């Protein structure tokens, strides 16, 4: 690792030693903050792309924009940004919502950001120095408040940061552009590979649940749009022929369950542990909650988006949800895959085109979607095949995801070491 010829103590613990000819300056001496805002005289029809705190991460920058008109915009949608600016969240600073602005075409950000603009420094170097891990951690450490930590912009611009000679800034920025560009390209390639693997995974599931896994089986038209052709020995039956709605209420010893698209059906205690926050367990109206047995399926508030969930544990769930009990001839593991498949979810959505996100799907919706009746042994074979194939693909995706995380860590390490002068670059 090449280093500069001579170093000096920066006098700031989080920075440490810096090259002898570099300086330490407060941000306010080489940047400006919050230069431009939309005024109340802005035309109501002005259309822009809005960025809020939740749309930004240190790893990926701005992840999404919300298109809106000024007349419909929240009052916090006011800060104007220009290419080369850096936005730093001054609220909920633990989220580390910091990003360099690369696209300024009618982009407006929340007043929860400080918009920092270079002044007599190279804007590219300034951006790298502010998305540097050490600087972001310094912002967090100076924030006040427990549940909603925030930093005042005046405190933010008084933070001292490293300022090399201008020619060095340009040289380092060009070097980082090349290196970070290469790393970003590698990350992008791996993300694309994950997307292809997910598409392949979905294709395998959809094919297996509607056509089985025998390659040479004779097929016939199911006359059901979402299913298409099926093996000739399969039948299509009403959903109520395979599942009934359970009306059984909570048992005295039942634990409270949560229906989650992310985790499936788990206990509320487990859900709190995984999410790392507390929720108040219900202590009233429990007599109306519904008893759940292993292999029951749940129609939840999010089934409209992500299908039905299978439960592997007993317990009780709020009366808002529908509990489905499999009848004879049903292998739950097969229907676990069918009920989460995109084709089935789309069919379920078509039964309730008046339902908006967050509203209930009922048993009356469920019974409108016909289901395949398949020999039990074949259901089990399909489920075993899908369990094995998806596990194999998921393992590959997990490995690639880990590689992406390591590349992100390396990217942040390179930025930090270069902008703080820990390594010299040619």
Image (cartoon, helix red, strand yellow):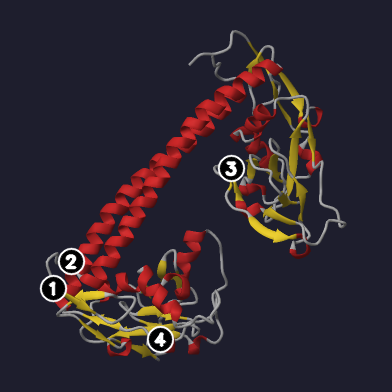
Image coordinates for residue 337, horizontal then vertical, percent: 30, 69
Q: Which of pointers 1 and 3 indicates the residue nearer the eye? A: 1
Disc 1 from disc 3: Cα separation: 53 Å
Please report the residue visible at 30 percent of the width from the left and 88 percent of the height from the top: 238
Q: Mark 4 = which residue?
A: 251
Q: Mark 3 = which residue?
A: 58
Q: Mark 1 = which residue?
A: 218
Q: Which of pointers 2 and 1 indicates the residue nearer the eye? A: 1
Q: Is residue 372 left or right of residue 363?
A: left
Disc 2 from disc 1: Cα separation: 12 Å
Q: Secondary structure at mark 2?
A: loop
Quadrant assignment, res 210: bottom left
Residue situated in front as seen by the camera: 44 or 249: 44
The answer to whether 53 is drawn above or below residue 182 in the figure is below
Q: Mark 2 = which residue?
A: 213
Quick one: label 4, few (<14), some, or many (20+) residues within 10 Å? some
Q: Secondary structure at mark 3?
A: loop
Quadrant assignment, res 416: top right
Image coordinates for residue 271, horizontal then vertical, percent: 47, 65
Q: Is residue 308 left or right of residue 212?
A: right
Dot placed on the residue nearer the N-terminal end, 1 or 4? 1
Q: Secondary structure at mark 4?
A: loop
Dot placed on the residue nearer the N-terminal end, 1 or 3? 3
Image coordinates for residue 363, horizontal then vertical, percent: 42, 87
Dot placed on the residue nearer the N-terminal end, 3 or 2? 3
Q: Which of pointers 1 and 4 indicates the residue nearer the eye? A: 1
Please report the residue visible at 77 percent of the width from the left and 24 percent of the height from the top: 120
Disc 1 from disc 4: Cα separation: 47 Å
Q: Secondary structure at mark 1?
A: loop
Residue situated in front as seen by the camera: 83 or 92: 83
């Amino acid at each position: 690792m090449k280093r500069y010829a001579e170093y000096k103590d920066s006098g700031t613990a989080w920075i440490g030693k810096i090259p002898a000819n570099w300086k330490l300056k407060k941000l306010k001496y080489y940047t400006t903050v919050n230069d431009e805002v939309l005024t109340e005289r802005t035309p109501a029809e002005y259309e822009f792309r809005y960025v809020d705190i939740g749309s930004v991460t240190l790893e990926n920058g701005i992840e999404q924009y919300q298109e809106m008109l000024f007349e419909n915009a929240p009052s916090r949608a006011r800060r104007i940004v220009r290419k080369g600016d850096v936005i730093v969240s001054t609220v909920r600073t633990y989220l580390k919502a910091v990003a360099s602005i690369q696209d300024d075409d009618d982009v407006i950000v929340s007043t929860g950001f400080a918009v920092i603009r270079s002044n007599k420094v190279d804007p590219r170097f300034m951006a790298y120095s502010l998305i540097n891990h050490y600087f972001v951690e310094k912002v967090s450490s100076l924030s006040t408040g427990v549940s909603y930590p925030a930093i005042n912009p005046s405190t933010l611009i008084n933070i001292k940061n490293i300022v090399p000679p201008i020619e060095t800034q340009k040289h380092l920025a060009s070097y980082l552009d090349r290196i970070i560009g290469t790393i970003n390209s590698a990350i992008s390639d791996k993300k694309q590979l994950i997307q292809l693997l997910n598409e392949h995974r979905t294709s395998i599931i959809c094919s297996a649940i509607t056509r089985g896994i025998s390659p040479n089986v004779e097929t016939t038209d199911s006359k059901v749009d979402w299913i298409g052709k099926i093996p000739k020995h399969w039948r299509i039956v009403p959903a109520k022929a395979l599942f009934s709605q359970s009306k059984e209420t909570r048992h005295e010893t039942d634990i409270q369950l949560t229906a989650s698209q992310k985790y499936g059906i788990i206990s509320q205690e487990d859900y709190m542990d995984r999410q790392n926050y507390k929720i108040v367990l219900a202590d009233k109206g429990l007599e109306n909650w519904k008893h759940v047995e292993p292999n029951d399926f749940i129609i939840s508030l999010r089934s409209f988006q992500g299908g039905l969930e299978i439960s592997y544990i007993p317990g009780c769930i709020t009366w808002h949800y529908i509990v489905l009990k499999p009848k004879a001839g049903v292998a739950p593991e097969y229907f676990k895959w069918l009920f989460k498949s995109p084709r089935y979810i789309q069919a379920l959505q078509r039964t309730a085109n008046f339902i908006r996100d967050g509203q209930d799907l009922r048993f009356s919706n469920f019974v409108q979607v016909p289901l395949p009746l398949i020999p039990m042994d074949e259901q089990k074979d399909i489920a075993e095949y899908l369990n094995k194939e998806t596990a194999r693909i998921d393992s590959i995706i997990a490995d690639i995801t880990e590689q992406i995380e390591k590349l992100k860590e390396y990217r942040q390490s390179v930025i930090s070491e270069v902008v703080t002068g820990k390594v010299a670059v040619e």
